[in-house]
Amino acid sequence: MTFYDFTISKLNGEPLELAAFKGKKIVLVNVASECGLTPQYTELEHLYEAYKDKGVVFIGVPSNDFGGQEPGTADEIQQFCSVNYGVTFPLAEKVHTIGSEIHPLYKWLTETTGEEVTWNFQKFLIDEEGKVVQSIAPAVSPTDPQLVDWLDGK
């Protein structure tokens, strides 16, 4: 299996066929609006703007799994991200990233990497062939060299 074998819905409920991103690098991030790491939205958006024309896609996946820090509805999440952080990268539906109700995509990600999602803003790097390259810890800034170097192909 690869990343492209999965489907997740957008915040508005429409399907987000991940196969549409074949040939692109993907940064998948579980996000939350009321987390101490929420300001990472600013860096994620800046990177998205800098790399979207270079074959990179950022996808935010809201989750309320950690500390109840994403309690909002789809409309509230979209509004929060747009108004407070100017987010223009795709946002998926709110899903579970851990536990018995884990979304199949996150089950695959954690089984493939051998790493559980530990908190909001964990970043999964997916290469152009749909394979997981790396999981980056939540507290690591999106502008950290390990992520930026990967985006730059280093």
Image (spheres, rainbow, N blue to C red):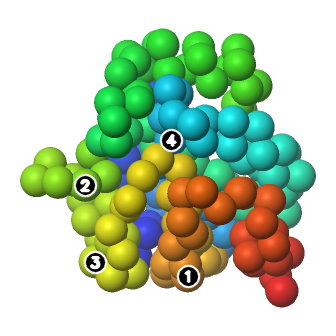
Residue under label 4: 31
Residue under label 2: 98
Please report the residue visible at 78 percent of the width from the left and 46 percent of the height from the top. Answer: 43
Q: Which of marks 3 and 1 is nearer the N terminus?
A: 3
Q: How crowded is mark 2: few (under 14 residues within 10 Å), some or many (20 or more)?
A: some
Q: In which quarter of the image is the N terminus?
A: bottom left
Compute the Cα span from label 4 to label 1.
20 Å
How far across and how far down the image is residue 30, in percent? 47, 48
Q: Nearer the viewer, mark 2 or mark 3?
A: 2
Please report the residue visible at 30 percent of the width from the left and 41 percent of the height from the top. Answer: 65
Look at label 4 and name its amino acid: Val
Compute the Cα span from label 3 to label 1.
13 Å
Q: Residues within 10 Å of mark 1 (few under 14, many from 20)?
A: some
Residue 82 figure quarter:
top right
Name above or below for residue 51 compared with residue 3: above
How far across and how far down the image is residue 107, in percent? 26, 65
Q: Which of marks 1 and 2 is in front?
A: 2
Q: Do callouts 4 and 1 mark residues in contact (Cβ within 8 Å)?
A: no
Q: Do callouts 3 and 4 mark residues in contact (Cβ within 8 Å)?
A: no
Q: Do callouts 2 and 4 mark residues in contact (Cβ within 8 Å)?
A: no
Residue under label 3: 111
Look at label 2 and name its amino acid: Ile
Look at label 3 and name its amino acid: Glu
Residue 71 figure quarter:
top left
Q: Nearer the viewer, mark 4 or mark 1?
A: 4
